[in-house]
Image (tube, rainbow, N blue to C red):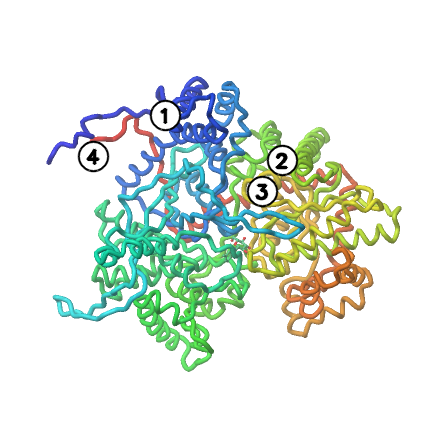
Amino acid sequence: TVPNPVLECKPIIQVEDDRTGLSIEALKRGFLDNLFYVQGKFSGIATKNDCYMALAYTVRDRLFKRWVDTAETYTKNGSRTVCYLSAEFLMGPHLGNNLINLGIYDQVKQAIEELGLDFYELLEQEEEPGLGNGGLGRLAACYLDSMASLEIPSLGYGIRYEFGIFEQKIQDGWQVEITDKWLRFGNPWDVARPEWSVEVKLGGHTESYVDENDRYRVRWIPFQVVKGIPYDTPILGYKVNTANTLRLWAAEAPESFDFEAFNSGDYVKAVQAKMTSENLSKVLYPNDNVSQGKKLRLAQQIFFVSCSLQDMIRIMKGQKIPLEKFHEKFVIQLNDTHPSIAVAELMRLLVDEYGMEWEQAWEITTKAFAYTNHTLLPEALEKWPLGLFGELLPRHLQIIYEINGRFLDDVRIKFPDDFDRLKRMSLIDESGERYIRMANLACVGSFAINGVAQLHTELLQKDVLHDFYEMYPEKFNNKTNGITPRRFMVLSNPRLCELIDSKIGNTWIKNLHELRQLEAFAEDVEFRHKFRQIKQAIKQDLAEYIKAKNGIDVDANSLFDIQAKRFHEYKRQHLNALHIITLYNRIKANPNIDITPRTFLFGGKAAPGYYIAKLTIKLINSIGEVVNRDPDVRGRLKVVFLEDYSVKFAQRVYPAADLSEQISTAGKEASGTGNMKFALNGALTIGTLDGANVEIREEVGEENFFLFGLTAEEVYAKKAQGYDPMYYYNRDPELKLAIDRISSGFFSHGDANLFKPLLDTLLHRDEYMLLADYRSYIECQEQVSQAYRDVENWTRMAILNVARMGKFSSDRSISDYCEDIWQIQPVKIELSEYLQTDV
Ligand code: TH1
């Protein structure tokens, strides 16, 4: 073998050496080095962003040793690996989180301050990668944190969107969308790996042929080929050496493509082809819980799925593992149906590209995939018009027909002569225009199917996936969602953490169940006092932020009542609005009425094409305009809309809440995770029996949770009876007055038409049963107001909420996935002192 000159160098890379040390001096030196050698600036002309970049690189330098050693260990051991496939990863800012997980937050803060810089200002400077819409994308990010912290070998696979979720501006009370140019100033956290690029075929047609072994084969002649370039981000676990990888694909035109145009001299046409290719990873679809059925979206899905599966095969080759062991080397978790085309794509790769027999390929495929369902909403269930699907993926269409034919034979054997069942379970909807049903494909192609909260999983089995439950009961299981306490406590709520640590130490950060030990302190007057002081100080900070941004004075002594989540009718922000109007009307009717002062805070984006959701944002801002300046209210009510809600902003908001609004129509919110983040930070919840609220209430105790509203069963029963919202409107004068105030134009400068579309849906259909739940909600809010006046007892309840949230750590969720689905064990990473050059 030819000697490799690199191997001769034997660079000595230690965990901590003179350039990667953790002493204050080494950190300062590292920062100045990076400012000079990476940013090319001297301190006199360095911008805030230069300083942020220099700091980010300084932290990154201290992470790479762990990252390289982790990759090396997995490669040597051929470790079984979880591949988490997701169209969204809502990571939030990396810098602070990496400082926490490295355990060097305080040192770095000191070093930066000694250099005369504002540490918090540099943290604020980070442009977060908003590569997700809401809960589903953030769940993927929390799971990466937990997998790394639990030392589980894992890869996150997704798309490196050039534009993430849009930036929200509020103009005249309306949402306006601005494109999110998050890569504008460069991204210090990812590394391009062009050497591992792969190609993805799109469009065209298929041809059959007979191979050299006289076997019938199919080849796909694509219309277009797109290149995927992987960008890797290290995902460091909390106080472990494990640093896993998030691998996001960016689309480009392959150099070889459109040679024809080049050769014919049409340079411009060739460059245009490059542009169409790059469209694939251009922008995140900004819909939460809705599928638009656009061709470009399907193209995004096959793009990142095919890149990822080809990458897994490359990794196996590198580790000399035969392809027959694919399902032993990898388990692939499908984050909703967005990556579910993977079932057909893996079959295509194994059968067409690697010549495997169908039966063996199917055996491997169905042992490799597991599917998580995240929603029951019909508008979110993905289905692709057959024509559109066949145009983009002609070979996959054939493969799906083949899977379907065999599958329906199985159904016939298990349920003879049940023709309706066959129609319902078919991978192809033939009731009208024909569609490919992605949830059905995911169910047939996976060995495990899970919902994201107990109630959600029950409803899946009873309703949306009932036929599949009867066919494969053994596949179904529940995995209640969780959140990472590193980002949503340690990083975002240092003051509360310090108080907790002073009583029970800090091992709760890795084992959240230990928070139970705080129960005893709920009875401790002094502890309650400190707990209250901390909440107060955080609320004061938020009040100052609001004053600066919105120009509104809010009283930090008032009850902070917060609803922060995507705007969607099923989440019922407008029910919250009806409560505000009701309180306002009571004050107008009786200006001396005794009301617990409240500040209503809203945050969240509406999908740009979702008119009613955008109108709800306008309604809330319009109510705020009236309420906030009415002298009769005298500061007892304030309404604030927090612009551009993001992960970064969420970290400010959760710790400041007294009351968490989790008021979706029962049966509609699959789990929710914001509910967990608020409660862990000491907010009490007002909520319905929906999603994970049910389990939160079970854990914290019913006496520490404000419950209202119909149950999921009652919602179904009422719908079946023929629900009439006018019944409630006509019988509840306060409800009628609240609605009439809106329709009269009272909140819209006399314009009686502005909110008509919103009111029409409420009065004539009320799909989400606001009117049925209104009275129960108002009464429950009265209990909240009373309870808040008993300061000591409120604090007691809040402490008990914190103490009893252990179950909702994403570490628990991931442990359950590992045991019940993935069959995977931790791999400890030992840091080698030298860079391994003796391969
Ligand atoms: C959300 C669910 O609405 C929420 O209840 C759950 O906690 C969260 O997922 C994590 O499990 C979903 N987000 C999306 C986004 C899209 C499509 C479906 C869902 S379900 C684009």
Mark 2 near mark 1, Cβ–Cβ under 8 Å? no
Residue occupied by mark 1: 37
Can the viewer see residue 803? no
Q: Report the front residue among 701 and 467.
A: 467
Amino acid, disc 2 = Leu
Whether the residues at callouts 3 and 4 have beta carbons within 8 Å, the answer is no
Disc nearer the start of the sequence (3/4) = 3
Q: CA distance from mark 3 to mark 1?
A: 34 Å
State the CA–CA distance, disc 2 to disc 4: 51 Å
State the residue position of label 4: 839
Please name the amino acid that badge 1 sits on.
Tyr
Foreground mark, 3 or 4, reads: 3
> Against 784, is 297 above or below?
below
Q: Which residue is mark 2?
A: 518
Query: For the residue carrying disc 4, how many other residues have a C-alpha within 10 Å: few (<14), some (14-19), or many (20+)?
Result: few
User: In this image, 225 relative to 438: left or right?
Assistant: left
Residue visible at 41% across and 27% down in the picture: 58
- Pick whichever of labels 2 and 4 is earlier in the sequence: 2
Sequence order check, earlier mark of 2 and 3 = 2
Please tell me the numbered disc located at residue 650.
Answer: 3
Label 2, label 3: how many angstroms apart (C-alpha)? 25 Å
